[in-house]
Image (cartoon, helix red, strand yellow):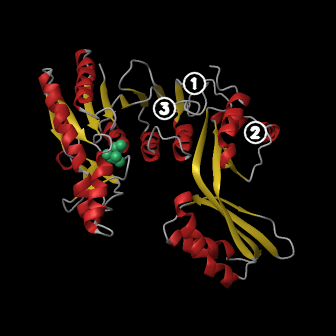
Amino acid sequence: MALIVQKYGGTSVGDLDRISGVAQRVQRYRSEGHDVVVVVSAMSGETNRLVGMGQEIAGGTPDPREMDVLTSSGEQVTIALLSIALQRLRVAARSLLGDQVAIRTDSAFGRARIQNIDTERLRGILSQGVVPVVAGFQGVDEGGNVTTLGRGGSDTSAVALAAALSADECEICTDVDGVYTTDPRLVEAARRLDYITFEEMLELASLGSKVLHPRSVEFAGRYRVPLRVMSTFEDGPGTLITIESENMEQPLVSGIAHARDEAKITVAGVPDIPGIASKILGPVGNANIEVDMIVQNTGADGLTDFTFTVKRQDYEQALELLEPVVQEIGAREINGDNEIAKVSIVGVGMRSHAGVATRTFDCLASENINIQMISTSEIKISVVVAEKYMELAVRALHAEFDLQDA
Ligand code: ASP
Ligand code: MG
């Protein structure tokens, strides 16, 4: 008998049949004797629909407080429907909104952070043998205002609840049956991983693997909540995300992530003097544009080139912002490319093995793929390549590191 927090995503509660299916799944856990806390997302597409309506009626940027009242309503619908479906199966259940739990957050509407969860009420409900069905994605601030945690935030709600309740496991129940060595839509030979470390999962999630919200992984790692990604629709063990342990054999590379929607900008012929990076990246950062990889050449003749990547959607704006800066710092020119992609290999095994970088570069060279930028960390190597070579790069690296074989 265990205490399990289960989170069901938008597709898992996408229509009434599926909600009934989720109710049956929860019933099964209850009949096995487990205590279950359920967290749900809104029905798939619903949050987008709500955001769209808010934007349309505002005719500009809507008030963030009202947007949170609006967008959080999707989860209010699914908690009630799932509770009713459970009751129909004679499973005692009670829906709870974020402020009823209460899940306290700061007041940053649209991207609030959880500060504290009051578990007393939940424990009371559990002790009566009732399944709490909690709205994901939402919380309440000090002033009693509804807040939301940012898109995809119900993963974080679930992990935070699991941490606060010291649950035995947090299950993220979704439409895939686990975390794969790479995107199975790209590489047929991709394989489900039985386990992966928090560190690796955090890299993969941040690098473009969409299975889990990066913040939820960070949270789970910090509070050591065992996290399992598994299918709502099929039986199977899924993938356990856990701490690194001595007796696990660590593969060199655990997974390969890719991000297609990238762009790079080069400011060329920049005077090689203090303060240049800050002058170039300052305006970009102030516009809330996220900069990812940054490369600066060693200077020659007192000049250097400065290259960085941004999300493709921010490319035009970043170029515009930099026009005046190029003048101001006396750089030669600015140019860019918005048809690039980032491919990253991730593995804690890299820490103790040299040669992974060389193998990566050799592999790409033998496919005639030009590497435009490189960045590394202890457990990751990322390269930027032309977008048209992205799939080939992922496939070649997947084979090179034998990821298809268990
Ligand atoms: N419903 C919210 C969204 O679509 C939260 C979530 O699904 O995790 O972003
Ligand atoms: Mg969602």
- The picture quadrant where one finds residue 380 is top right
Amino acid type at circle 3 is Ile
For label 1, the crowd category at 10 Å Cα-Cα, with few meaning under 14, some 14 to 19 and many 20 or more, is some
Percent of width and height locating residue 62: 29, 66
Determine the residue positioned at 67% across, 64% down: 336
Percent of width and height locating residue 125: 15, 33
Please name which of the two marks, 3 or 1, marks the residue nearer to the observer: 1
Q: Which mark is residue 224?
A: none
Q: Which mark is residue 241?
A: 3
Q: Secondary structure at mark 1?
A: loop
The relative height of residue 123 versus residue 338 in the rendered view (above or below) is above
Q: CA distance from mark 2 to mark 3?
A: 25 Å
The relative height of residue 324 versus residue 51 in the rendered view (above or below) is below
Q: Which mark is residue 191?
A: 1
Quadrant containing the N terminus is top left
For label 2, the crowd category at 10 Å Cα-Cα, with few meaning under 14, some 14 to 19 and many 20 or more, is many
- The residue furthest right is 301
Identify residue for label 2: 360
State which image quarter holds ligand 2. top left
